[in-house]
Amino acid sequence: MEPLPGREPGGRWQVLLEKLAGIDDQLAAEYLERIDGGARYYDGVPDEHDLKDSARNAFRYLLGCLLARPLSADLMAFPAQVGALRARQGIALENLSAAVRNDFLVAWSALLRLADDADMEVLAMHVGQLWTVVDDFAGAIQRGYLDERLQMARTDIIEQQQSLSDLFSDEPGPTVVHRAAEVLGLDETASYWVVGVAAEGASSTVTRRLAGLDGVALDHTSKGVTLMLLSAHSRWPDDEALAADLLAGVTGAVASRTVQLPNVFRAATTVRMLAQLGLPSTTLRRSWAKLSIAQLCTVIDDLRSYVEVPLAAMNDRDLLVETMLVYAESGSVSATAAKLYCHRNTVLNRIRKFEEATGISLRTPRAQAMVQLCLLRS
């Protein structure tokens, strides 16, 4: 038996879809009713205007695909955009996916209302097509959601590392401390330990040990040292107890005491210098002498070059150095002249030449001591 005119399966399917496209606002309203205005899946997070627009665009997108119509650029981008929006709104992916698949039920119910008894065969032939388009739509939304969550995670990591850098690297103001506490989920009134490890892979060892104690540390690597921030705990009454628990056999150091967030940078500065000594499981009380010597040597090397460079080009450089060393012993021009068997004006002239060349005034004992340290090895 031949089908009635206009009843060919393909043609009738197109007719039903055209009717469906003409009631997209009604479909959106039915969708919102089915999901209880968003309460069923979204806990009321998206507002009513957001949900209405999204539902309307969803059915326009689906019917455009079913009718093989060209979609506008905005409509093409809609699935990824709404997925990203729901990710930013904190909607769970499983809730989002379940909500989206209600589009199929709404569209199918509307098709059943629009069809007559003779259309049942047409619907049966095309139900798979409808489900495939809805499923592809849900997949595009999921991809947009996951892409956004990945970007959010990357942003979170960047913000966390920046906040840790702010706390570890310089004296932060109250605004920076407050922002860092928000980003890192820290209590501004609490106290924290600062731990530093210098050896490659040592931070993972410390992290594993800490996990075994049900603890968590925030870490940031700078200048070859991984600095770790962890909450104070009664298990660690002092730095030695913490070092014994976390740093046994590990090249690293612990701050001398717990600190609040505004003072983390001070503890971090000391810990970084201690860790760079290359000692296992050390503390300031055990290594202050080595740290002092190491830091003094560094400073003196810098100062020595600062003093030596301008003197190197002077013809009487050795004579000036000798005079400055003798003068630094007593700070007395007369005593220096007597010891060097020269007139006191000669000593004054040499001091003047030294000060003009280096920019260092020798009028204070502190300056004289510094010059003496710089020149002694010469």
Image (spheres, rainbow, N blue to C red):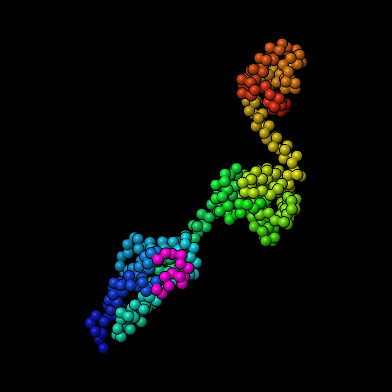
Q: Which residues are magenta?
A: 33-48
Q: Main secondary structure of the magenta part?
A: helix
Compare residues 363 and 190 and report the one nearer the observer: 190
Foreground pick, 348 / 73? 348
In-image side of 155 versus 19 (left or right): right
Which residue is the extreme one toward the bottom?
1
- Does residue 250 show up? yes
Quarter holding the N terminus is bottom left
Tell me how many marks there are.
0
Which residue is found at the position 72% from the left and 56% from the top? 234
Q: Residue at x 63, y 28 (%)?
A: 306
Q: Position of residue 372 (x, y in %)?
A: 71, 25
Q: Residue furthest left?
A: 5
Asked if residue 77 lies left or right of residue 331, the reply is left
> Where 331 sits versus 173, above or below?
above
Q: Within the image, what quadrant is residue 85 found in?
A: bottom left
- Say which quarter of the image contains residue 111: bottom left
Q: Position of residue 27 (x, y in %)?
A: 35, 73
Quarter of the image where the C terminus is located:
top right
Q: Residue at x 27, y 76 (%)?
A: 15
Q: Is residue 57 magenta?
A: no
Q: Nearer the viewer, residue 55 or 328?
A: 55
Magenta stretch: includes residue 40 = yes
Is residue 201 at all visible to an observer of this figure? no
| 242 to the left or right of 37 | right
Identified at 61% across, 20% down, the residue is: 356
Residue 121: percent from the left, percent from the top?
A: 33, 84
Q: Where in the figure is residue 129, as x and y percent of width and height?
A: 37, 75
**Would you place residue 216 above or below residue 302 in this image?**
below
